[in-house]
Amino acid sequence: MRSVVDYLIYACAFCIIGAGAVGAYDAVTMPAQVTLSDTGETAGPFDVMPTPFPGRSKITMLIVGADDREGEGGRSDTMILLFINPRSRQTALMSVPRDLLVNIPGHHRTRINHSYQYGGVDLTRETIEEVFGVDIDFYAKADFEGFIEIVDMLGGVDVEVQDVEGRGRGMNYDDDRDGPNGLHIHLKPGLQHLDGEKAIGWVRYRKSNTYGLGDGDFGRSGRQQELLKALVQQKLKVRNWLNLAKVARKVMDWVETDLSVREAGELALVLKEIKPENVMQASLQPYLRDRPFNGMAVVDISDSSIRHVLDEVDDHLRSAPGLTADIIVLNGSGHPGAAAAAGARLSRQGFEPEDTGNADDFDHEDTVIRYPGEQGAAARAIRRALGTGDLEEIEADDTKADDQITIVIGRDFDFEHSDED
């Protein structure tokens, strides 16, 4: 029986579906080249596409890797939640353990990967939304045929191969019964450039032919996220959208998604600007408990642990105060140099105030930090940096309000120690 080429094809398919769609989006919505009036230079499609997902501070996408076999129920061994803040480009990945014990709507309590067998991607989506309390905006699902060709068309991928087996042995596994050519994994530890076939082996590895060696499903789950991260960084950072569009046409033979062409193009615009330090790899592993259930080996997790991990994801998506578009510091205390002193303190804490000046009056006893709703995390970080400040959320009734945090310094600001940070 053919084994599932779990994790790899799906991560790759997701990455390039957005990038390739840029070509289609560009072809149907705008000319191939646009002249920039102020410089006379031409811009490609990435430069002239509109702001992605306007008004949205969080996009959640479900990635499902499935093995659909004719005459058999499909199987899903890869379930990844991808969270993106399209404004800040903060991103988080969270793998859903396939053996997680859950209640599947309309069915019974069993492993979560059975949801795909019972009701396809729709039931998998519904189950994850109910278990994790998240709203999934989009999904992407792929089968595993043709993966080697696609990775090779992308020019391979660079990854760090772990020395899982120790003593420099890296990863080694052979199974002649796995598929027509079997599964053969022989990878040395260290930074490696992997073609499609070797990349499949790197992601599929979970145990060695040497008894007792390997890193199991959790290690494989981690490599799934590492691969997705590497493909985004290495393949979407360069301006080779024409080649990516060609690859995407190939990928579309194996990918199903509810992303429109426009949404896929917007997603590509976000993905190409993601920096390594902006990607969080969230993990449920520390909170999982092994237990037997109806003769099966499953893992369980408490609702509070799920909420804790998702709160960390939300904090990450709202973080990166240096990406705040505008911070304005105004002197409302009447103390000479108050705004400049506060701005200098913020600069030392990693913020970049755009301007300082005087408020409309100098009668402010308390410092006030006014912020648009999606900048709440940055506003709280500013309050910590200043050591004071009442937070006031403002309505985003105009474009300026969307981009600006205004700080009015009051008499409660500690001027005497502002130079000692």
Image (spheres, rainbow, N blue to C red):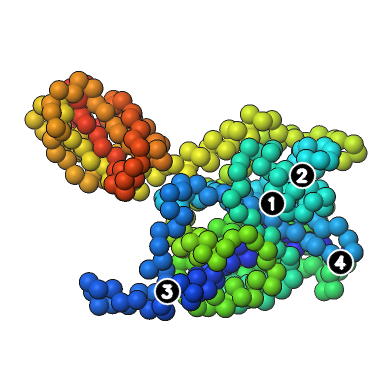
Label 3: how many Cα within 10 Å (few below 14, some 14–19, many 20+): few
**Marks 3 and 2, how far apart in space?**
43 Å
Q: Are marks 2 and 1 in contact (CB under 8 Å)?
A: yes
Per the image, the residue denoted by label 4 is: 70
Callout 4: SS: loop
- Tell which of 106 and 293 is nearer to you: 106
Q: Earlier in the sequence, mark 2 or mark 1?
A: 1
Specify the amino acid type for callout 1.
Met
Give x and y (percent) for residue 167. 67, 56
Per the image, the residue denoted by label 3 is: 30
Q: Are marks 4 and 1 in contact (CB under 8 Å)?
A: no
Q: Earlier in the sequence, mark 2 or mark 4?
A: 4
Q: Are marks 3 and 1 in contact (CB under 8 Å)?
A: no
* Above or below: residue 274 compared with residue 402: below
Q: Quadrant of the N terminus?
A: bottom right
Per the image, the residue denoted by label 1 is: 79
- Tell which of 167 and 86 is nearer to you: 86
Q: Earlier in the sequence, mark 4 or mark 1?
A: 4
Q: Quadrant of the C terminus?
A: top left
Q: Which mark is residue 112?
A: 2
Label 2: how many Cα within 10 Å (few below 14, some 14–19, many 20+): many
